[in-house]
Amino acid sequence: MYREDQFLPLVGVQHYLFCPRQCALIFLEQLWVDNYLTASGTVMHDRVHKGPNESRGDIRTVRQLRMRSFRLGLTGIADAVEFHLADAQHPGVKLPHARGRWYPYPVEYKRGRPKRNNCDRAQLCAQAICLEEMLGLTIREGALFYGETRHRVTVPLDTALRQETEDASRHFHEMIDSGITPPAREGPHCKSCSIRELCLPNRLKSAKEYIRRHALEG
Ligand code: SF4
């Protein structure tokens, strides 16, 4: 269990699984650059956050819901949490100004398209674990909405994803506590990295130094 003063931003789990170095550059070294990718992502999230809380049939949607987990040591604001009318299979909680009981269904909005690894799914799972801890129930699934494909993907919150999320959260904490930024590990994921310009110039600079040093030695 973590104390409140040890909490880290929940979104760090997504960055850590995307690339530990990216996570360290953002949360340890406080580096960030706005580019097309981040700007369009911000516009999309603003649109989601500024939308009204909605009530449609058996679904109530709450936007910008603040959440936290003492077990993961994370806190953040969810884009949207839908509350679906509870039934025998899905026990729920009471909501203000609504009759009956409702069970939470987190929905996270992403600018791009589904990724190969579990970074987005783990972010959603961390949100679900926060909600479970705050509301005292179990959440079986949530969804990711991708802006580029305009597609909503259902995410089962199974044991394997929960374990990966807990591990990523623990490693994120350990990395922040160590104060050490991991070295760059270039790969296909770098192409869609929002801070590539901040990460890779260091490597280019080292290469220049390498050439200069060897030229001098020659
Ligand atoms: S450019 Fe690649 S190695 Fe560097 S932070 Fe981004 S994803 Fe990680």
Image: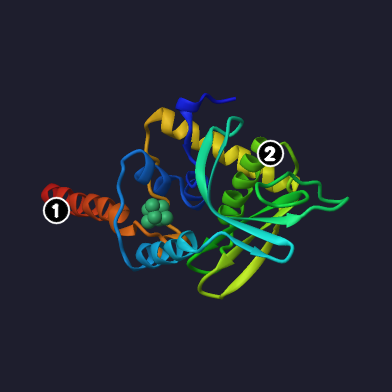
Q: Which residue is mark 1?
A: 215
Asked whether residue 81 is in view, the answer is yes
- Pointer 2 and pointer 1: residues touching (CB < 8 Å)? no
Q: Position of residue 46 (x, y in %)?
A: 42, 62
Horizontal side of 89 relative to 93 (left or right) equals right
Q: CA distance from mark 2 to mark 1?
A: 64 Å
Residue placed farthest to the left in the image? 216
Residue toward you, 75 or 87: 87
Label 2 sits on a secondary structure element that is helix
Picture residue at 72% right of the left edge, 54% below the top: 141
Q: Earlier in the sequence, mark 2 or mark 1?
A: 2
Mark 2 or 1: in front is 2
Q: Amino acid at mark 2?
A: Leu
Horizontal side of 181 relative to 87 (left or right) equals left
Q: Position of residue 87 (x, y in %)?
A: 85, 53
Residue toward you, 89 or 175: 89
Label 1 sits on a secondary structure element that is helix
Residue placed farthest to the bottom in the image? 149
Q: Position of residue 2 (x, y in %)?
A: 55, 25
> Of the numbered discs in the image, which one, if any, rests on residue 135?
2
Horizontal side of 180 relative to 142 (left or right) equals left
Picture residue at 77% right of the left edge, 48% below the top: 101
